[in-house]
Structures are given as structure tokens and as C-alpha cells.
């Protein structure tokens, strides 16, 4: 293994296990919920039992409800040993999605798939706003992973990656809102915290400018302090040679013929993950690193997770600092923060006018605005678009929050 792992992490060789060699980065944490060890349903032998969840996707979380929850401890009463945030990370084609789904099922947690630009372009009625491209000014046309793979030097790469940051940030808020409202843990396929890996690789390969990179980190600085870092990160380690082979085997033409996925770009992703991301996240969360070149057994990973004591560090340690709170009022205050996602998303409004590829002319913006908000399902709040089949609009009192 590379020198990156010489960061004070204890190594554990599991060469006889089905998953191959394991680097067990026991970066410890302290959690305030009563039970400190995550348990899988196989070991537990029964389904986790929780109080009734708060229907956060349909119902607004009011100040009155928050006061009631403080009084009756309704937030922490839903917490158990599995009320944790788990992130599965790794390079392209590492096998994260299949593993994360299996892990979420075994741990009885909610699975959050990796975000794509579909989250941005496909609205709540299923209408794909990329259909508007023929009418859009060139600089305002859609740009997603498929277009990046084919044209990594396009002007819109910088705005695309910033939108990816925003989508990952939005999803992470959703994950925290779910955890606080239901007590159910979450498993995310990648997260907002590793998004910078791709920005750095893009910058090193000339896909984005120094100015765009600077804007990106201004946004990170202005937004990340509102979040709570994960309890556990699982990194699936796959070398570039295996990544390339898997990309070829899965037969995605955008990937197979990509001008972006060069050897240098893929190697930079691996290096940045190992030299920066893992080193940083390990100061806050538990970290398990597996050699996933030949894939592995989810059961083996679950066994390793069950051995982790999430309550090993004192109050002054950096590990799990985000998850130490003094009382129910503090927990409910944090919960309130994630129930108002629009407020948190407003922190992305950082004025920067010195990066040409991120500047839009008034004429182009107006053309985009007029088309975007006249598209099916975009004119009014969800539930109030008659042309999309919504009815009873005049008598509705329900507030759609998602």
C-alpha cells in the first residue's frame, strides 16, 4: 500500500477472509446515543423497533412541534445503536452501489444512491428539463456526466461540478433530516465530503480553471459548517488498472470512448482520495478501507462494523465531535436546521464575478428563466400544477415540502 496510510492508523490483515486483505482504519468516534455498536440484523436476530417516525416529507416541522419534541424528548427517543451516517466511497466502477445497497439492507438503514444530474434536471413530475436544450442559448444548455465524459474541456464543466456539489449537499441534508425524523440510520453512495476529489482531479488535468476551483472552495467554506460529518466511511480500494477493466466490461459508450477518463485523470482520483480525503475524514469518523479488486463479502464488512466501539473518545477529541450534544434542546435545534433545507441551500449564494466560465449574461439568463419556469411542473409549487394532473387546487391546504 502507498505511504498515505502511514497516518497513525492501525492495520489489520484479513488475508484469509472472503474480502481479501483489509486495511482496518480504526479511526474512533464518540456517539451520544446509549448503545455504541452498530448491529446487523443477522447478529441481532430481530428487527429494530422504533417509535413512530415524524412524516418529514409531507409535514412541515413547526416551532410548536419542536417545543413539544424538546419537552417529551421525541428526537432522541427514536435513536438506537444504528442511528448513524455511513458513507461508502471509492473510485469509479469500484462496486460501491451494489455493496452500499446490501449494507443498508443488513443494517436496516435507508440507502441513498449516488446523486447524478438527473436529480437537477428531472423535476418532481418526471419531466426532463434537458428537453429544453434546443431552445436554450448554448451557455445555458444542460451539462451532465455524459457530456463531461465526451467533452471535459467544455466551458460548462465548472458550473456542472458546482451543481454536483450542490446536489450532494442537498442529498446529505435529506439524509440528516431522515435520520433525525425517524431514528433510522442512512447509507450514502458517496457524499458531499468527497466531492472535492473530482474537482482536484479536474483541475490537475486542465478541465477547470484556477478561478473556478477558487469559487468551489469559497462555496465549501460557506456551507460545510452547517453539516454533521458521518460516523463511518467505508472506502473500497480499486487500482486504476482494475477500474479501466471494469469500465470496459460494463459497456457504457460514454465511458468507453471518454476523452475525460484518461490514465492520468483516474490515477489522480485515486491519489487524491488516499492522500487527502481519507487522511482528513479519518480525523472525524471511523474509517474502514478494503481491497475491493476482486470485490468482497458484505457479511465480512458487517462483522468489522459490529466490532467498532463508537463511544471510545472523550469530549475533547475531534472524532464524532459533531454528534456530541448536551441535551434534548441541542438535538432538536440541529433537527430544525435540516428540516429547512431551503435556508441551508441559500448559503450557496456567494457573489463571485471574476471567473468568466461562471458568468451568465442577462440576456442568456432571461432566456433560460423564461423557458425553465414555463416547463411542465415548474410554474408552481408541487401539487399546484393543473397541467400536470393536480386537482382540487383551490381547496388545498397541504404544504408540499419535497
Image (cartoon, rainbow, N blue to C red):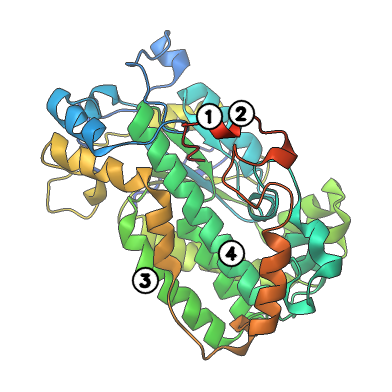
In terms of secondary structure, where does tag 1 sit?
helix
Left or right of 291? Residue 86 is: left
Which residue is identified by label 3?
221
User: How many angstroms separate mark 3 from mark 4 (CA)?
Assistant: 16 Å
User: How many angstroms separate mark 3 from mark 1 (CA)?
Assistant: 43 Å
Which residue is identified by label 1?
395
- Badge 3: how crowded within 10 Å, few (<14), some, or many (20+)? few
Image position, residue 329 (x, y; %) = 14, 38
Q: Residue furthest front?
A: 394
In terms of secondary structure, where does tag 2 sit?
loop
Image position, residue 360 (x, y; %) = 63, 82
Which residue is identified by label 2?
392
- Badge 4: how crowded within 10 Å, few (<14), some, or many (20+)? some
Name the image quarter holding residue 244: bottom right
Decide which of 128, 283 is in the foreground and name it: 128
Q: Check if mark 3's residue and mark 2's residue have beta carbons within 8 Å.
A: no
Name the image quarter holding residue 63: top left
Q: Check if mark 2's residue and mark 1's residue have beta carbons within 8 Å.
A: yes
- Residue 163 is marked as 4
Q: Earlier in the sequence, mark 3 or mark 4?
A: 4
Amino acid at each position: 500500500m502507498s505511504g498515505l496510510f502511514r497516518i497513525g492508523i492501525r492495520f489489520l490483515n484479513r488475508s484469509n477472509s472472503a474480502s481479501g486483505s483489509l486495511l482496518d482504519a480504526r479511526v474512533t468516534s464518540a456517539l451520544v446515543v446509549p448503545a455504541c455498536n452498530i448491529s446487523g440484523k443477522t447478529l441481532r436476530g430481530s428487527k429494530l423497533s422504533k417509535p413512530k417516525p415524524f412524516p418529514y416529507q409531507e409535514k412541515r416541522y413547526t416551532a410548536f412541534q419542536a417545543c413539544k419534541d424538546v419537552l417529551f424528548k421525541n428526537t432522541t427517543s427514536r435513536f438506537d445503536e444504528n442511528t448513524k451516517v455511513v458513507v461508502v466511497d471509492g473510485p469509479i466502477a469500484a462496486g460501491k452501489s451494489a455493496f452500499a445497497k446490501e449494507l443498508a439492507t443488513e443494517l436496516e438503514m435507508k440507502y441513498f444512491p449516488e446523486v447524478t444530474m438527473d436529480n437537477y434536471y428531472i423535476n418532481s413530475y418526471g419531466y426532463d428539463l434537458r428537453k429544453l436544450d434546443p431552445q436554450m442559448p448554448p451557455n445555458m444548455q444542460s451539462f451532465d456526466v455524459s457530456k463531461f465524459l465526451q467533452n471535459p474541456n467544455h466551458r460548462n464543466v465548472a458550473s456542472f461540478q458546482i451543481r454536483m456539489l450542490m446536489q450532494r449537499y442537498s442529498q446529505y441534508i435529506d439524509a440528516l433530516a431522515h435520520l433525525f425524523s425517524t431514528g433510522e440510520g442512512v447509507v450514502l453512495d458517496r457524499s458531499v465530503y468527497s466531492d472535492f476529489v473530482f474537482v482536484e482531479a479536474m483541475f490537475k488535468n486542465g478541465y477547470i480553471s484556477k478561478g473556478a476551483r477558487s469559487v468551489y472552495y469559497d462555496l465549501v467554506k460557506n456551507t460545510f459548517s452547517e453539516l454533521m460529518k458521518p460516523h463511518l466511511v467505508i472506502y473500497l480500494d480499486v487500482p486504476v488498472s482494475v477500474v479501466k477493466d471494469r469500465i470496459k466490461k460494463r459497456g457504457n459508450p460514454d465511458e468507453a470512448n471518454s476523452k475525460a477518463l484518461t490514465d492520468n485523470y483516474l490515477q489522480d482520483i485515486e491519489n487524491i482520495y488516499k492522500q487527502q480525503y481519507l487522511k482528513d475524514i479519518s480525523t472525524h469518523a471511523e474509517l474502514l478501507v478494503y481491497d475491493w479488486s476482486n470485490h468482497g463479502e458484505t457479511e465480512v464488512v458487517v462483522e468489522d462494523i459490529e466490532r467498532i466501539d463508537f463511544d471510545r473518545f472523550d469530549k475533547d477529541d475531534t472524532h464524532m465531535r459533531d454528534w456530541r450534544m448536551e441535551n434534548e434542546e441541542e438535538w432538536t435545534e440541529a433537527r430544525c436546521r435540516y428540516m429547512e433545507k431551503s435556508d441551508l441551500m441559500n448559503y450557496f449564494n456567494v457573489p463571485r464575478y471574476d471567473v468568466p466560465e461562471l458568468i451568465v449574461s442577462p440576456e442568456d439568463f432571461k432566456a433560460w428563466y423564461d423557458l425553465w419556469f414555463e416547463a411542465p411542473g415548474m410554474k408552481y409549487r408541487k401539487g399546484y400544477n393543473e397541467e400536470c394532473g393536480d386537482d382540487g387546487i383551490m381547496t388545498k391546504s397541504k404544504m408540499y415540502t419535497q
